Amino acid sequence: MTPEDNNIKSVVKTIKKIGGKKIGFIIQYGSTVTGEQTPLSDIDIAVYYQGTKKQRFDFIITVLGSVDDRFDIHIFQDLPLYIQQEVISKGKILYQRDFETTFDIFMKTIQRFSDFKPLLDIYYEGLEG
């Protein structure tokens, strides 16, 4: 186990301690999962936290104040839809409270993204000129 793996495990433990039973899942995503990291890369973590927008904000502020600056931690529900899609398609699950809940959230996200993707494609085509 690498020192980075130990740091990630420690952060997961911290997130679970702060969030308790409101944590649905914790997923590592981004360059450290895809193998495209550089020496300046941070470690991206998405957390599904069950709570109001204010509760999610308070939770993430507490978490960010408790972990190393190399970790970029976000609430899954508050990420843009295209990043949520990246998280579930390329991410690495570090913790899930239960498979059924995670599966349900993933399926709803995939459905929402498939509804959104044609509009995103039109937008990108417009940028290309």
Image (spheres, helix red, strand yellow):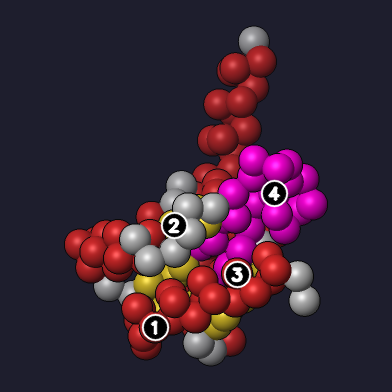
Magenta stretch in the rendered image: 26-46
Q: CA distance from mark 2 to mark 1?
A: 16 Å
Which is in the foreground here, disc 3 or disc 2? Answer: 3
Badge 1 marks a residue whose secondary structure is: helix
Spatial CA span between label 2 and label 4: 15 Å
Residue at which label 4 appears: 31
Q: CA distance from mark 4 to mark 1?
A: 26 Å
Q: State which tag comes first along the sequence, 2 or 1.
A: 1
Which numbered marker is on residue 74? 2
Residue located at (60% from left, 17% from top): 127
Q: Which mark is residue 17?
A: 1
Horizontal side, residue 63 vs residue 107: left or right: left
Position of the N terminus, as image quadrant, is bottom right
Q: Position of residue 77 (x, y in %)?
A: 41, 60
Three-letter code for the amino acid on which mark 1 is drawn: Lys
Image height of 14 relative to 85, above or below:
below
| Of 129 and 43, the residue lying toward us | 43
- What distance separates the C-alpha of mark 3 from that of mark 2? 17 Å
Between marks 3 and 1 in the image, the one whose residue lies nearer the viewer: 3
Q: Residue at x 51, y 67 (%)?
A: 108
Residue at the spot 53% in from the left edge and 89% down from the top edge: 98
Residues at discs 3 and 4 in contact (Cβ within 8 Å): no
Q: Residues within 10 Å of mark 4 (few under 14, many from 20)?
A: some
Residue 40 is one of the magenta-drawn residues:
yes
Of the image marks 3 and 4, the number of the one nearer the N terminus = 3
Percent across and percent down for residue 57 are: 27, 60
